[in-house]
């Protein structure tokens, strides 16, 4: 990609990772290097565009199409999200995993921060799940196993993800999931206290402001597993407070069709005591990989993307 020093970065009143300048100066990219092909999603302070890099237009489309997250600086500041945006850039630029979206470059101009990511063409798992109503145990196992590998990888760098939900899981061209939206991801040695995430997926310790860490991601895995198998999340209400109450009461309705091994796995993830939660005990994430519900999963082959959905 060409380097053009004429990026509109003059008069930048807000400090976004100025000391780091992670990708900005090195990438030399600017918005006009891209054609906008459409909108992939919209969020509170930005949107994700499908873009094509102009000077590599002769490349196969899989190599010149990208997802570009555009974050409006004034909105980031107004919503006090500067730290989160910086953390997202910092973390995504340093991780590389087959089930995590790639961040190729970031740049900025006076209005926006731009994050150039791999275009993951299959849409959100959310859409697929609502369309299918629920997934079979085999399909659920395949998706959940990929997420567990991604979280295990992130946790090995003390990164907690904190926003697991079907909306943040994209399907790639081969049907594998890619974790996206690291807006709430954080590097923590032990625990952190900020309330963030999505009500249905919050662990009790987050709601109770008890300090949360990696275990909160494993709790969310339990919620995700239930939602994929059943079609709706285990703790559900009209209002966030109703949801929090249900999470704290901890009653789970088990559809009669759900087998005992699946219940056992979900119960182990949804242990309100994070010190006894699957993934957060002495065996760490290995306990999850060893759970009988995953019997037969070839974890190494899966991480090499040698296993296909439903097989
Ligand atoms: N929506 C949000 N991020 C995306 C990505 N990287 N690819 C496709 N759609 C997306």
Image (cartoon, helix red, strand yellow):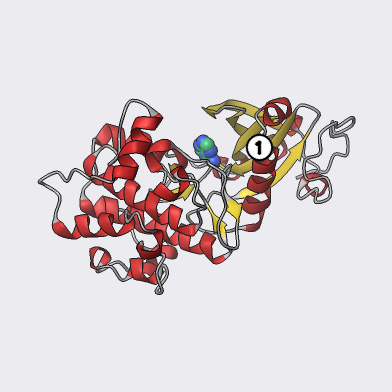
Q: Residue furthest bottom?
A: 283
Residue at (28% x, 46% y) in the render: 250
Q: In this view, does 122 lie above or below 287?
A: above
Within 10 Å of disc 1 (Cα), the crowding (few <14, some 14-19, many 20+) is some
Front one among 266 and 203: 203
Whether residue 174 is visible here, answered yes or no, is: no
Q: Which image quarter: residue 289?
A: bottom left
Q: Which image quarter: residue 147?
A: bottom left
Front one among 223 and 22: 223
Front one among 64 and 141: 141
Whether residue 10 is visible here, answered yes or no, is: yes
The residue under label 1 is 57
Query: Where is the C terminus found, in terms of image quarters?
Result: bottom left
Front one among 7 and 61: 7
**Image location (x, y in percent) of residue 123:** 43, 36
Left or right, residue 21 beside residue 224: right
**Image location (x, y in percent) of residue 257:** 11, 47
Query: Where is the N terminus found, in terms of image quarters?
Result: top right
**Image location (x, y in percent) of residue 233:** 30, 39
**Image location (x, y in percent) of residue 255:** 14, 43
**Element marked by disc 1:** loop
Left or right, residue 107 beside residue 44: right
């Amino acid at each position: 990609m060409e380097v053009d020093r004429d990026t509109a970065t003059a008069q930048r009143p807000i400090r976004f990772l100025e000391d780091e300048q992670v990708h900005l100066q090195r990438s030399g990219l600017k918005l006009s290097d891209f054609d906008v092909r459409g909108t992939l999603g919209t969020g509170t302070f930005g949107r994700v565009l499908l873009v094509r890099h102009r000077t590599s237009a002769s490349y196969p489309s899989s190599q010149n199409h990208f997802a570009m997250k555009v974050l409006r600086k004034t909105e980031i500041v107004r919503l006090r999200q500067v730290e989160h945006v910086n953390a997202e850039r910092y973390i995504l630029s340093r991780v590389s995993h087959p089930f995590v979206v790639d961040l190729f470059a970031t740049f900025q101009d006076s209005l926006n921060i731009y994050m150039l990511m791999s275009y993951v063409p299959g849409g959100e798992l959310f859409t697929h799940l609502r369309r299918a109503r629920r997934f079979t145990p085999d399909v659920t196992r395949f998706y959940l196993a990929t997420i567990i590998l991604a979280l295990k990888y992130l946790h090995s760098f003390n990164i907690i993800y904190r926003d697991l939900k079907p909306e943040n899981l994209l399907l790639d061209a081969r049907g594998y999931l890619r974790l996206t939206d690291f807006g709430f991801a954080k590097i923590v040695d032990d625990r952190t206290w900020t309330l963030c995430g999505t009500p249905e997926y919050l662990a009790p310790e987050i709601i109770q402001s008890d300090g949360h860490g990696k275990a909160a991601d494993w709790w969310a895995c339990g919620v995700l597993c239930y939602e994929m198998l059943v079609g709706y999340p285990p703790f559900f209400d009209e209002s966030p407070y109703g949801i929090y109450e249900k999470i704290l009461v901890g009653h789970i309705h088990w559809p009669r069709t759900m087998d005992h091994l699946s219940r056992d796995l979900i119960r182990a993830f949804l242990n309100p005591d994070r010190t006894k939660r699957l993934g957060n005990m002495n065996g760490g994430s290995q306990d999850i990989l060893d759970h009988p519900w995953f019997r037969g999963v070839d974890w190494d082959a899966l991480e090499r993307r040698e296993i296909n959905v439903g097989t």
